[in-house]
């Protein structure tokens, strides 16, 4: 361990990690049972929120030597933030872990390969919706050209860790981008749609159904063109400044009095969008605008209820014979405190009986790109989740976030349950349930 | 610690069950007590009494300190490895071994979470009453070692009242079994009682047989708000004087009410000066009568409003709020230092008043909550450890609270233990002869002082603040 790095790391922690936020933790341990990594590591305090906060403090104070074990403690955090609602002291763990990652990123000498990768991803692809579209086009080509079949057959993917192989198995086929139209239904609200970079590319059909559902309920849906990736992936990886670049662009793109709501259909994005205000409160040019932006944020389930969908669902008569369950999106639940709304909708969905999945509120292990970075831990967490699924035996697992959706699909596939159940996005689920109930008004154009 | 010794520990428990990375040693350097921290040299997770006996023998041979640690929720620095050494974890010993419905006992390993014991008993129509606020996190081994109390202590007593038998590894590595599934047993000294609450300083508890009782069929929860702390305290004394022993009789002051409301958002009135949470269980008729009587007493003593929980869910929310009180108070200032002073319950009003006066005298912020019904209060200093000058005033205030409690016939700790934090004050409560006897016990059972050294006994006792006649 070079003392130069030690010093640099300590300075960086002092610069980036807010001491007052650390001091909010009184170490009572109420967070422990809520933390998926603590439970999955045989109750290793190192991998608990309390342990990580103690290590943040120790790094600031110079009480611990920076080494791979300390780095791993921070790395292995899912960032699911389940510790926050569990914490009576109100510790803001999310900002703390983001600041920690920024501190590490600034002080750590990066291998040139990682640097190029990061630069390419965060400055390039995720910062620019056009590039994202182009990147996706490559994936699209790969999928449509039949190359996918070939590589699956010949094991090109054996080069990847096993988990990535499973992810490959569940990548949805990408739709060709269609022109979007506005509807002429009687107007209840004007809604600006934050399409999300993953949702807009890999999950285009879900986005299309989101728009159609909203229009059917009487919302005018507008998709501001200048919008970009929300910046969550940057923020969670210690690149908060780059994330804020996206934030400012999005705030400008959505800054209009015409919008009653800014809706998103991805829990991970939604949480970060709702935190723009907090992140930009020191920015003289954006503080006010960011507050306006945050105030209008709403997730798709809450908006659907506001527009009266659950009343419509109740009127649709059908025998509830298929079991549906819900896997929470951590950020939707823990940051935006939305967990009743999706359940309310599922309970009213015609033809389905809602049953609660055990520990539905705990992370599935997807956690952004965590399952790619830490496949082993993600797998352990997913295994625990799938035990609950096997007990419940639902026909459908509904989620509110693309990462959770893919992860649950991986889980289903790995357990060999793909003939018995499927994982779907809540919008797709509701759309299809209504469609099946012969509501011709929502049939696809 | 030398690699060779680490390897010997690894040979006992398996390489995957020892922890000694930088991060891990740091993560086991604290518990829930502010301002106490010290790193161990090694963390081991044994799977059996026999493995623990081997660990202790090795520690005895090499004179390595041993600290048993459940979930690290201790509030008196009892699980801080003050002198380094080996921390023993119990997550591999977390089985409920037996529920004996004929003798009404449950035998468990020390790593079982307290709440799991409670739930398991209730699933069989039985009841394990001790319910420390941290019961969702704390382990039964920790509860037994600390003789933990809880919200139901007033009517049902504390952990020691439910421990029937123990298996303990002593400081020389020998295995001792005490007690049994017996209603009566006077065979020699009551070693079970000696070991309960011994804070890991006499041995390591490796198996516990708990007493269970029939689950009460009915319970009801009420609340009363007051314009003054004194009115609430008088209500408490009056309830007891009316020969009502409720399950729970909890007290919270304005600061605590506000902090809980910030966390739970359950609609508590932030302008109330004090709140009492009352619960009674038993037969329906008795419960309804007692709850009504207690509410009547509260009104007579000046309660500004009262209500009875409409459902068990509502009651559970109220109790969950109370359980979160200490941690919720941590919202207010960077550091919370909590006390556990306990007085005879007849003196509760005087104690509450004394705490208020002491807070004023030293100009420190103290919020008080606690188990008013059993005289066990938790005055909590809200402060900032980085402010040296304020910390000095805090320390003086806390010392004066100890002194006030003792003068009222009370104790320095009702349920959190002495640990490292209160060791300098132990002599205030038990006197020189008390310390002498305890030291003799400690020396005879742990002559090398390897069992949780630095706890209970201080290097030097604090001088008492006030000279007075008793």
Image (cartoon, coloured by chain):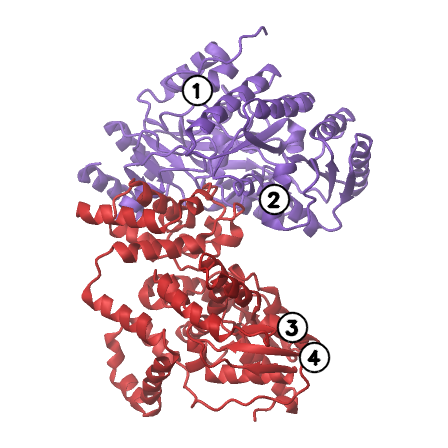
Chain colours: A red, B purple
Residue extending furthest front?
A: A285
On the image, numbered disc 4 is attached to which residue?
A312
The residue located at (52%, 24%) in the rendering is: B398
Cβ–Cβ under 8 Å for marks 2 and 1: no
User: Is there any visible trace of residue A321 in the rendered image?
Assistant: no
Secondary structure under tag 2 reads helix
Residue A286 vs residue B375, the one in the foreground: A286
Check the image and report above or below for A415 versus B112. below
Check the image and report above or below for B459 versus B321. above
Residue extending furthest top?
A: B469
On the image, numbered disc 3 is attached to which residue?
A305
Of labels 2 and 1, earlier in sequence is 2
Judged left or right of residue A406, residue B301 is right
Residue B229 vs residue A339, the one in the foreground: B229
| Residues at discs 3 and 1 both on one chain | no
| Residues at discs 3 and 2 both on one chain | no
Residue A333: % across, % down:
53, 62
On the image, numbered disc 1 is attached to which residue?
B424
Q: Chain of mark 1?
A: B
What is the crowding at mark 2: few (fewer than 14 residues within 10 Å), some, or many (at least 20)? many
Secondary structure under tag 1 reads helix
C-alpha separation, residue under disc 3 versus residue under disc 2: 30 Å
On the image, numbered disc 2 is attached to which residue?
B260
């Amino acid at each position: 361990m070079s003392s130069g790095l030690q010093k640099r790391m300590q300075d960086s922690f002092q610069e980036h990690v807010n001491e007052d936020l650390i001091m909010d933790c009184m170490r009572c341990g109420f967070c422990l049972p809520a933390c998926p990594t603590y439970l999955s590591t045989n109750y290793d305090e190192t991998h608990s929120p309390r342990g990580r906060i103690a290590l943040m403090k120790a790094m600031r104070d110079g009480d611990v030597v920076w080494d791979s074990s300390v780095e791993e403690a921070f790395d292995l955090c899912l960032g699911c933030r389940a510790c926050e609602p569990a914490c009576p002291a109100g510790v803001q763990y999310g900002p703390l872990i983001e600041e920690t990652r920024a501190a590490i990123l600034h002080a750590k000498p990066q291998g040139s390969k990682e640097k190029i990768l990061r630069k390419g991803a965060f400055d390039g692809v995720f910062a620019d919706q056009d590039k994202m579209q182009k990147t996706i086009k490559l994936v699209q080509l790969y999928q449509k050209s039949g190359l996918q079949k070939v590589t699956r057959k010949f094991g090109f993917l054996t080069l990847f860790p096993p988990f990535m192989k499973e992810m490959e198995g569940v990548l949805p086929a990408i739709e060709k981008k269609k022109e979007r139209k506005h509807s002429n239904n009687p107007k209840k609200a004007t809604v600006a749609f934050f399409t999300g970079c993953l949702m807009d590319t890999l999950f285009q059909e879900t986005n299309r159904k989101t728009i159609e559902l909203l229009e059917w309920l009487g919302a005018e849906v507008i998709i501001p063109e200048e919008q970009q990736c929300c910046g969550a992936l940057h923020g969670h990886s210690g690149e908060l400044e780059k994330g804020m670049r996206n934030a400012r662009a999005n705030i400008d793109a959505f800054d209009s009095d015409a919008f009653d709501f800014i809706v998103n259909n991805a829990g991970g994005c939604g949480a970060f969008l709702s935190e723009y205000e907090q992140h930009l409160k020191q920015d003289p040019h954006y503080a006010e605008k960011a507050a306006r932006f945050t105030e209008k944020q709403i997730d798709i389930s809450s908006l659907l209820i506001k527009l009266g969908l659950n009343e419509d669902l109740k009127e649709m008569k059908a025998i509830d014979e298929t079991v549906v369950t819900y896997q929470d999106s951590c950020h939707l639940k823990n940051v935006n405190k939305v967990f009743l709304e999706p359940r309310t909708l599922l309970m009213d969905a015609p033809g389905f009986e809602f049953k609660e999945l055990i520990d539905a509120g705990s992370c599935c292990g997807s956690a952004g790109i965590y399952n790619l970075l830490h496949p082993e831990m993600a797998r352990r967490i997913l295994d625990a989740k799938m035990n609950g699924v096997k007990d419940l035996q639902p026909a459908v697992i509904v989620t509110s976030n693309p990462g959770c959706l893919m992860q649950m699909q991986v889980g289903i596939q790995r357990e060999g349950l793909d003939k018995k159940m499927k994982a779907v996005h809540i919008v797709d689920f509701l759309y299809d349930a209504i469609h099946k109930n012969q509501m011709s008004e929502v049939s696809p154009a | 610690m030398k690699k060779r010794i680490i390897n010997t520990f690894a040979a006992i428990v398996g390489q995957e069950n020892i922890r000694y990375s930088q991060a891990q040693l740091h993560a086991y350097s604290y518990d829930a007590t502010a301002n106490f921290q010290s790193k161990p040299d090694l963390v081991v997770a044994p799977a059996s009494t026999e493995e623990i006996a081997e660990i202790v023998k090795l520690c005895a041979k090499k004179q390595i300190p041993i600290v048993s640690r459940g979930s690290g929720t201790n509030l008196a620095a009892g699980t801080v490895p003050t002198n380094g050494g080996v921390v023993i974890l119990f997550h591999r010993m977390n089985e409920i071994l037996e529920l004996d419905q004929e003798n009404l006992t449950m035998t468990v390993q020390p790593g079982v979470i307290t709440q799991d014991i409670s739930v398991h008993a209730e699933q069989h129509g039985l009841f394990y009453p001790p319910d420390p606020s941290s019961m969702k996190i704390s382990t039964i081994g920790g509860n037994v070692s600390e003789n933990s109390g809880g919200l139901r202590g007033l009517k049902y007593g504390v952990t020691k009242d439910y421990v029937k038998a123990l298996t303990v590894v002593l400081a020389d590595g020998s295995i001792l079994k005490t007690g049994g599934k017996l209603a009566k047993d006077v065979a020699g000294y009551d070693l079970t009682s000696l070991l309960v609450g011994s804070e890991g300083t006499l041995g390591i508890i490796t198996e516990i047989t708990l007493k269970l009782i029939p689950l009460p069929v009915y319970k009801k929860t009420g609340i009363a708000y007051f314009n003054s702390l004194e009115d609430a305290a008088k209500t408490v004394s009056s309830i007891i004087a009316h020969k009502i022993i409720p399950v729970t009789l909890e007290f919270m002051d304005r600061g605590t009410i506000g902090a809980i409301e910030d966390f739970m958002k359950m609609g508590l009135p932030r302008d109330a000066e004090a709140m009492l949470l009352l619960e009674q269980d038993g037969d329906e008729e008795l419960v309804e009568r007692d709850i009504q009587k207690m509410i009547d007493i509260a009104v007579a003593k000046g309660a500004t409003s009262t209500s009875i929980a409409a459902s068990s869910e509502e009651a559970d929310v109220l109790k969950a709020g109370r359980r979160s009180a200490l941690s919720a108070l941590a919202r207010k200032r960077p550091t919370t230092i909590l006390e556990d002073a306990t007085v005879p319950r007849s003196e509760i009003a005087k104690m509450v008043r004394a705490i208020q006066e002491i807070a004023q005298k030293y100009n420190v912020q103290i919020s008080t909550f606690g188990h008013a019904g059993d005289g066990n209060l938790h005055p909590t200093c809200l402060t900032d450890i980085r402010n040296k000058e304020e910390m000095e005033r805090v320390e003086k205030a806390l010392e004066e609270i100890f002194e006030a409690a003792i003068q009222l016939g009370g104790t320095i700790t009702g349920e959190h233990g002495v640990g490292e934090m209160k060791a300098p004050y132990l002599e205030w409560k038990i006197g020189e002869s008390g310390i002498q006897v305890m030291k003799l016990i400690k020396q005879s059972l742990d002559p090398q002082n390897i069992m949780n050294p630095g706890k209970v006994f201080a290097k030097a006792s604090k001088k008492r603040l006030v000279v007075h006649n008793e």
